[in-house]
């Protein structure tokens, strides 16, 4: 069977790249992530884009929203002086649909409700995003027996050649978009010839 290049590209490209979600942190001087939640599939990418002044994207647990997860990811503090120019970005690749809980480590920010979640259960679930945010703002911790207290992580962080931190998933190879697209184009050309 013979496929044309555009048809094959349209069929393969979305599957190979997954969805990308852009999440701003501290935009307009607000102590918040925007959006505050995303629903992502395995292979999707979440880009945390930092705005002034200094914030982080640090993995935690539902039960301890303002405590860094020992084996979790963290962007570290990303100081930004101005909204102009290129803003630093931290990338996380989602491995599965298990909820991932995130907070800003800057003093007082998490307790002000500056939290984020990937794939949180919907309200009225006791482990919904609104419950997570309320727990963060209360300064309390929840019972360690709930399912959201998982202490697993989805990878290790590294720095890209542009100097911006990037999160890569466990077992996933870190490739540039050019390498991925180049490989896809090569595969599509071979398929078009057949």
Image: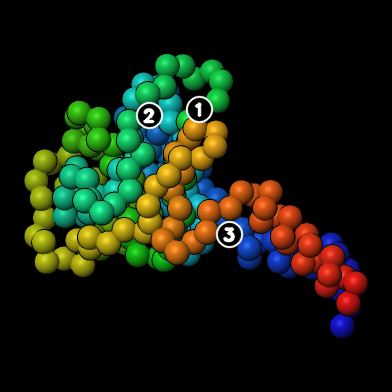
Residue 10 in the image: state x and y as whole percent.
Answer: 76, 63
Among the two numbered marks 2 and 3 on one chain, the one whose residue lies closer to the N terminus: 3
Residue position marked by numbered label 1 in the rendering: 87
* 10 Å crowding of disc 2: few (<14), some (14-19), many (20+): many
> In this orientation, does residue 126 appear?
no
Residue 12 in the image: state x and y as whole percent.
Answer: 71, 66
In the depicted structure, whether residue 110 falls above or below residue 179: above
| Left or right: residue 113 compared with residue 179 | left
In three-dimensional space, the C-alpha distance between marks 3 and 1, rounded to whole angstroms, equals 23 Å
Residue position marked by numbered label 3 in the rendering: 18
Instruction: Tell me the mark number nearer the camera, choosing from 2 and 3.
Output: 2
Residue 157 in the image: state x and y as whole percent.
Answer: 39, 47
Which residue is pictured at 41% across the width and 22% down the height? 80
Query: Which quarter of the image is occupied by the C terminus?
Result: bottom right
In the depicted structure, whether residue 92 falls above or below residue 106: below
* 10 Å crowding of disc 3: few (<14), some (14-19), many (20+): some
- Image quarter for residue 52? top left
Which residue is pictured at 63% across the width and 63% down the height? 16
Residue position marked by numbered label 2 in the rendering: 78
Query: Which quarter of the image is occupied by the N terminus?
Result: bottom right
In the depicted structure, whether residue 21 falls above or below residue 42: above
Tell me, yes or no, whether the two marked residues, 3 and 1, touch with CB atoms within 8 Å.
no
| Left or right: residue 53 compared with residue 188 | left
In three-dimensional space, the C-alpha distance between marks 2 and 3, rounded to whole angstroms, equals 26 Å
- Image quarter for residue 155? bottom left
Which residue is pictured at 48% across the width and 35% down the height? 164
């Amino acid at each position: 069977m013979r496929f044309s290049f555009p048809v094959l590209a349209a069929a393969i490209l979305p599957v190979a790249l997954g969805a990308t979600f852009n999440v701003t942190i501290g935009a307009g001087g607000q102590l918040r992530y925007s959006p505050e939640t995303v629903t992502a599939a395995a292979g999707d990418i979440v880009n945390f884009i930092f705005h002034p002044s200094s914030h982080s994207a640090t993995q935690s647990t539902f039960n301890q929203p303002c405590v860094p997860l020992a084996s979790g990811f963290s962007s570290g503090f990303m100081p930004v002086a101005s909204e102009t120019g290129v803003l630093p970005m931290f990338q996380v690749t989602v491995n599965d649909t298990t909820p991932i809980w995130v907070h800003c480590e800057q003093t007082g920010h998490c307790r002000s409700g500056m939290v984020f979640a990937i794939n949180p259960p919907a309200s009225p679930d006791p482990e919904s995003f609104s419950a997570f945010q309320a727990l963060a703002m209360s300064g309390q911790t929840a019972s360690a027996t709930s399912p959201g207290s998982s202490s697993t992580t989805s990878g290790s962080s590294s720095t890209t050649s542009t100097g911006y931190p990037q999160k890569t998933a466990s077992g996933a190879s870190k490739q540039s978009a050019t390498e991925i697209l180049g490989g896809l184009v090569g595969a599509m050309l071979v398929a078009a010839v057949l």
